[in-house]
Image: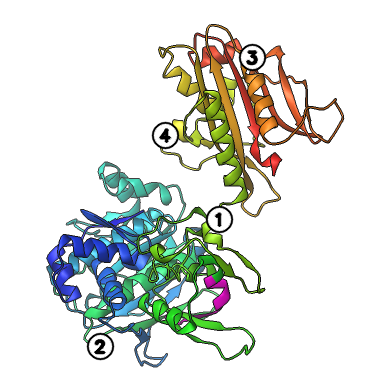
Amino acid sequence: MPTVSVGRDRLFAALGRTYTQEEFEDLCFSFGIELDDVVNISPYDLLCLEGLAQALRVFCEIQEIPTYRLSDISKNAMLKMHVKPETCLIRPFVVCAILRDVTFDRARYNSFIDLQDKLHQNICRRRTLVAIGTHDLDKLEGPFTYEALPPSSITFMPLKQERNFRADELMEFYKSDLKLKKFLHIIEDSPVFPVLYDSKRTVLSLPPIINGAHSAISLETKNVFIECTATDLTKAKIVLNTMVTAFSEYCANKFVIEPVEVISSDGKSNIYPDLSFYNMEVSLSYITGLIGVSLEAEEVTKFLNRMQLHAKQSTSDKKQCKLVVSVPPTRSDVLHPCDVMEVLIMTGFVIPECILDLDVAIAFGFNAIKDKAVVDNKGSKRLAASLTLLPLNEMSDLIRKEVALIGFTEVLTFILCSKKENFAMLNRKDDKSKAVVIGNPRSSDFEAVRTSLMPGILKTVAHNKDHPKPIKIFEVGDIALLDDSRDVGAKNLRQLAALYCGANAGFEIIHGLVDRVMEKNGVSFVSPGDKSGYYIERSDEPEFLAGRQARIIYKGKHAGTFGIVHPEVLNNFDIPDPCSFVELNIESFL
């Protein structure tokens, strides 16, 4: 979760009053953000003091929801950005806007720069998806062009430098720059680099690396030209909206943004920024039924308005009460009726696992939700979804409790591991068909998502091999496997894994654990081929000792494997004592 550091006195001044520490903690808690020396937040519009203060003012009903609009300017009078076809080779999209007659002071200027950095680190994914450029418009002359040229043909003076560089020279120059060198990989191997020019061929920026020094903004800047180049157009529009809505309050004409016409290489024209509202129709019974509270439509609309969502009761359906929610350009996180619920809950209740992203609930307060039956939109009574465990989580908790009662200690290991640990160290071959591989991992220890709980369990034993024997540990957790039938290309599976390590392998103890888990799930041991229960059959997995391992077959399907861990595998993990291990798929019981 990103954090925002804001000056206390400046924030209190923006809110119009001074708070004690306890009062401000209560306000943040009610609003659904965490206060710890810095403020922990999630929506992008709260990444700067301006957005945070405005959201709190609306929440406290000090201020009305602001209405952002484009300045009244004809299309012919708009500044234009012409996009060349070569940009499709590297960063195909650009969106732009202008903040006119802005008044900066030192604090506002620093906040403006800091917001760009925060966005670059979050939604922009370290500039790979979007790069933001801000310029003093009075130093430039439109129309502008967005081009992609060979690096040797681009020459300009970059920000904070005193001489001109060719773009290819800049790549070498910035390899010693601690801040900029981490962005070089985005374009340095491309035959063309993206570049923006004004009508006099003055370079605005070389995205996503550096802006030109000629158009650098300062405290004296009055008209700010903002451009966002991107590989993801949706993200670019969100970033641009976040920038202009947060700082348009400092314009002489408050909350008014001047648009820019972007003309694509195929002649298609688009006007940015897009400040239109997205209207969503939400059933009142859907909101109250899932949260577990009874609220009238008037109460819900009031709560939504406090969270900067315009809401009113719909007249389109006489039989069912529905709300029309207008989502402003600042709330890109609201995409679904489930998100609308988020506004009603967060005043101090621990967020249930099944409603992590709900939006009618912040203003109402989690503390106000009671454990009681509600009437759903079909007229039947049931426990609110926010108060019931998902079946998989309920089953996982029951198995945890039972295995712990047998005398095993639960451990929690990393979901990411190295490819070597996931395959070679387990005597397995990587056929590229199972593991989800991490792109550009930070280290070799986190190259892939685990396809088994075994590496983490063995590493735990290896780091505790001097612990008194026997060691009896277990884990209930998720693994991930590639699956082309899923929209994301992979699926999660909930697994139980347990290991016994001692003077002897303890195969009979792990076998007994399997029988106990099955017994507590009401599954009986049956003859091979019988699909009414479970049985075991010979297996030949490379991580186990041959002839000392078995497959668990439940209702005719493979549900798990257990056996004595192969000595080579133990040696790979530097474990001197014999071990037995079981891994069982929990979802097979549902």
Colouring mode (rainbow / by chain / secondary structure / one colour): rainbow
> How far is the residue under mark 4 from the one under mark 3?
36 Å
Horizontal side of 200 relative to 555 (left or right) equals left
Callout 3 touching callout 1 (CB < 8 Å): no
Residue under pointer 1: 388
In terms of image quadrants, where is residue 548?
top right
Q: How crowded is mark 2: few (under 14 residues within 10 Å), some or many (20 or more)?
A: some
Which residue, given by chain and number where applicable, does mark 2 sit on?
253
Mark sitting on residue 538? none
The amino acid pointed to by label 3 is Phe
Which element carries disc 3, helix, strand or loop?
helix
Residue 236 appearing in the image: yes
Q: In this view, does 552 lie above or below 373?
A: above
Q: Which amino acid does label 1 sit on?
A: Thr
The x, y position of residue 284, in whole percent, is 54, 78
Q: Are marks 4 and 3 in contact (CB under 8 Å)?
A: no
Q: Which callout, 1 or 2, points at the residue further toward the start of the chain?
A: 2
Residue carrying label 3: 507
Which quadrant of the rendered structure holds the C terminus?
Answer: top right
- Sequence-earlier tag: 4 or 3: 4
58 left or right, relative to 547? left
The answer to whether residue 274 of the structure is visible from this angle is: no
Exactly how many numbered labels are in the figure? 4
Q: What amino acid type should be assigned to the residue bearing mark 4?
A: Ser
Q: Which of marks 3 and 2 is nearer the N terminus?
A: 2
**Mark 1 and mark 2: span between their CA atoms?**
50 Å
Q: Distance from label 2 to label 4 (Cα)?
A: 49 Å
Residues at marks 3 and 1, CA–CA distance in whole angstroms: 38 Å
Magenta part of the protein: which range? 275-288
Residue sitting at x 40%, y 46%: 185
Question: What residue is pinned by disc 4?
Answer: 443
